Image (cartoon, grey):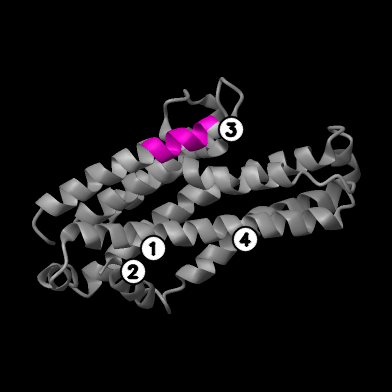
């Protein structure tokens, strides 16, 4: 039953431009470094002995913003599709539980954001090869800064989906999302417990995997809270 709902949700977004967003996000992040390195490549190469690491860290400066902004757009868009067609009542009238409907929305958004992480890895790796930074390619670092921000951002995804699905006006989740983007941009100034800081992979312990583990654990918690609230509310 879950698979059927997921397939139905993917069909709903087939021609809505969400797949284009999935491509634009990671490409845009790497494209900024294409401009950066195209203008002052020699200067950037002098900033750190490990040129690959410096290149990856430059890209990671914008990755959290792209992920948080993408999550805001995707979750609000998923909910607005149902609002525009008045499909919430039709969904819950089917012989499926509200938990399954909510899980389907969460799964679809998660898949799109994860696919963006895959594309980010490919774009980051591909452009890095063209810069001639050496044959000692840090594959683990590339994977770390491509995929861990996704796991670290799961609480943001859970919160945005929760607010988007229970709000009668999508201005509320969008406003929350704008605040989240601002917080993600100011990640270096935030304490480690703020969830919008976690996609930056920075913390006082100096281990990026901690943010990913916190994201998975707290993300599941926020998802469950959202699912319980969605199940108990009347349909919009």
Q: CA distance from mark 2 to mark 3?
A: 31 Å
Q: What residue is pinned by disc 1?
A: 108
Q: Which residue corresponds to the image point at 20% horizontal and 53% vertical from the top-left?
A: 166
Q: CA distance from mark 4 to mark 2?
A: 22 Å
Q: What residue is pinned by disc 2?
A: 6
Residue in front for this viewpoint, 232 or 54: 232
Q: Which residue corresponds to the image point at 78% horizontal and 57% vertical from the top-left?
A: 127
| Stretch of the chain drawn in magenta | 210-217
Of labels 4 and 2, the one closer to you: 2
Q: Where does the C terminus fall, quadrant-wise? A: bottom left
Earlier residue among tags 3 and 4: 4
Earlier residue among tags 4 and 2: 2
Earlier residue among tags 1 and 2: 2
Q: CA distance from mark 1 to mark 2?
A: 7 Å
Mark 1, Cα crowd under 10 Å, few <14 / some 14-19 / many 20+, is many
Q: Relative to 211, say whether 99 is above or below.
A: below
Secondary structure of the residue carrying tag 2 is: helix
Q: What residue is pinned by disc 3?
A: 208
Q: Relative to 138, say whether 82 is above or below.
A: below
Mark 2, Cα crowd under 10 Å, few <14 / some 14-19 / many 20+, is some
Residue 105 appears in which quarter of the rendering?
Answer: bottom left
Q: Relative to 198, say whether 110 is above or below.
A: below
**Residue 103 spot, x, y in % from top left:** 29, 57
**Residue 178 spot, x, y in % from top left:** 41, 46
**Residue 172 spot, x, y in % from top left:** 27, 50
């Amino acid at each position: 039953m879950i698979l059927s709902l997921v397939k139905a949700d993917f069909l709903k977004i087939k021609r809505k431009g969400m797949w284009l967003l999935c491509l634009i996000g990671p490409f845009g992040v790497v494209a900024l470094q294409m401009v950066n390195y195209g203008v002052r490549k020699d200067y950037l190469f002098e900033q750190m002995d490990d040129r690959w690491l410096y290149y990856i860290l430059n890209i990671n400066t914008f990755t959290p913003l792209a992920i948080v902004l993408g999550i805001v757009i995707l979750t609000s868009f998923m909910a607005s599709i149902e609002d525009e067609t008045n499909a919430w009542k039709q969904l819950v009238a089917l012989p499926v539980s509200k938990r399954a409907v909510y899980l389907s929305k969460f799964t679809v958004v998660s898949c799109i954001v994860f696919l963006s992480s895959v594309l980010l890895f490919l774009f980051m790796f591909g452009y890095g090869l063209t810069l001639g930074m050496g044959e000692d390619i840090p594959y683990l670092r590339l994977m770390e800064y491509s995929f861990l921000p996704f796991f670290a951002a799961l609480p943001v995804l859970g919160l945005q989906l929760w607010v988007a699905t229970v709000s009668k006006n999508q201005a509320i989740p969008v406003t929350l999302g704008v605040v989240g983007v601002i917080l993600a941009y100011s990640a270096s100034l935030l304490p480690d417990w703020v969830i919008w800081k976690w996609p930056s992979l920075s913390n006082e312990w100096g281990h990026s995997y901690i943010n990913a583990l916190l994201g998975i654990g707290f993300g599941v918690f926020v998802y469950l809270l959202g699912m319980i609230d969605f199940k108990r509310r009347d349909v919009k």
